[in-house]
Amino acid sequence: MERRYNFNAGPSALPQEVLDHAQSELLSYQQLGMSIMEFSHRSKEYQKIHDGANELLRELLNIPDDYEVLFLQGGASLQFSMIPMNFLSEGQQGNYVITGSWAQKALKEAEKIGNTFIGSSSQADDFRSIPDLGTIKYSDQDAYVHLTSNNTIHGTQWKHFPKNDQSRFIADMSSDILSRSLPVDQFSLIYAGAQKNLGPAGVTVVILKKDMLKNIPDNLPTMLDYRTHVDKKSLYNTPPSFAIYMLSLVLQWTKNNGGIQAIEKLNAEKTNLLYDTIDGSKGFYNGTADKLSRSSMNVTFRLPGKELEELFLKEAEEEGFVGLKGHRSVGGCRASLYNAVPIESVHALCDFMHTFHHKHNI
């Protein structure tokens, strides 16, 4: 069966090699007569996968030894609540940098827990840009400073991250983790839903600096306390074992294909191809994000008129392109260029866009 061109924003494309590998041992993992989904999470077979995924992630992201790696459930959305529950103490505030819808959702959950503060926001320009680092306001009362590294809906991305010796930074990196080199040691906590670059939906990665654990109060529900998962090595309850198995395969695929440096280089090639097509169309396609803030993962653009956009999306789907419709909250078009999207798919999209432009130029 011919594969479609998958530009979905999430759940998103998975590497063909990974899918083939998983298919080959779906019924009998390593010829043991059982699917990995059927093994006990206490078995030595699953433990090897679990530990291997942890080690590979540490290697690929160069995670320092004073950080814990956790595999949790509930998506990034649960982290919106867990973070203030664990770290937002009375008399402190959660400092949130607002660059889009997901940052707003994180702020909304923190407001239910304790005091919050907006250190900077790009809402005034409809989230077309990332705030200048110098505009972020800090306070002695900040328990942490929270940011979203890549904004899937608005197509913007932090190119450089803020630094402040007095602040603990926390980042939602769901949509660009593993896509580029990241300064893990600049953050006290990083979290990411897997369904963009890490694997299928179902597991959430948390990278947590160990010294954060001393700030956690003792009155939290057991499952919402990071110490529970650190102490039990993410095995306090039954983990999403198949999702972690798939995560391990994606991490191995990343390593086999040259690691972060090679992936980052290929992602830049894909991104440049598509943005060059948009910018070279003389306004027929119009990128919605400011050029200095453009995302390498989610390319957002508009066409001249709603009817033409709908026709573009209709013809694109007929040609085998999936996931090009922009988020329902903003409309327009969006192509997500996550790690597993092959460059051949981007070439095909650019060719289609040139053809559509030639047919419908006004």
Image (tube, grey):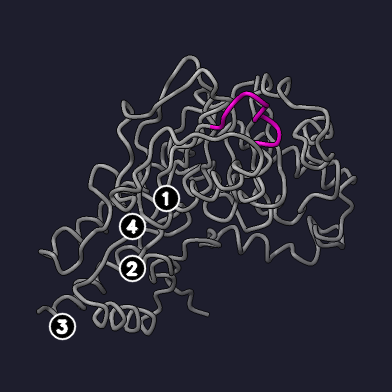
Sequence-first disc among 3 and 1 = 1
In depth, the one of 44 and 293 nearer the eye is 293
Q: Quadrant of the C terminus?
A: bottom left
Q: Which residues are magenta?
A: 84-94
Q: Is residue 7 magenta?
A: no
Q: Residue at x 70, y 55 (%)?
A: 243
Q: Residues within 10 Å of mark 1 (few under 14, many from 20)?
A: many
Quarter of the image holding residue 215?
top right
Q: Are marks 4 and 2 in contact (CB under 8 Å)?
A: no
Label 4 to label 2: alpha-carbon separation: 8 Å
Q: Is residue 85 magenta?
A: yes
Indicate the position of residue 14 as horizontal and vertical percent values.
Answer: 54, 60
Sequence-first disc among 4 and 2 = 4
In depth, the one of 299 and 128 nearer the eye is 128
Amino acid type, callout 1: Gly
Sequence-first disc among 3 and 2 = 2
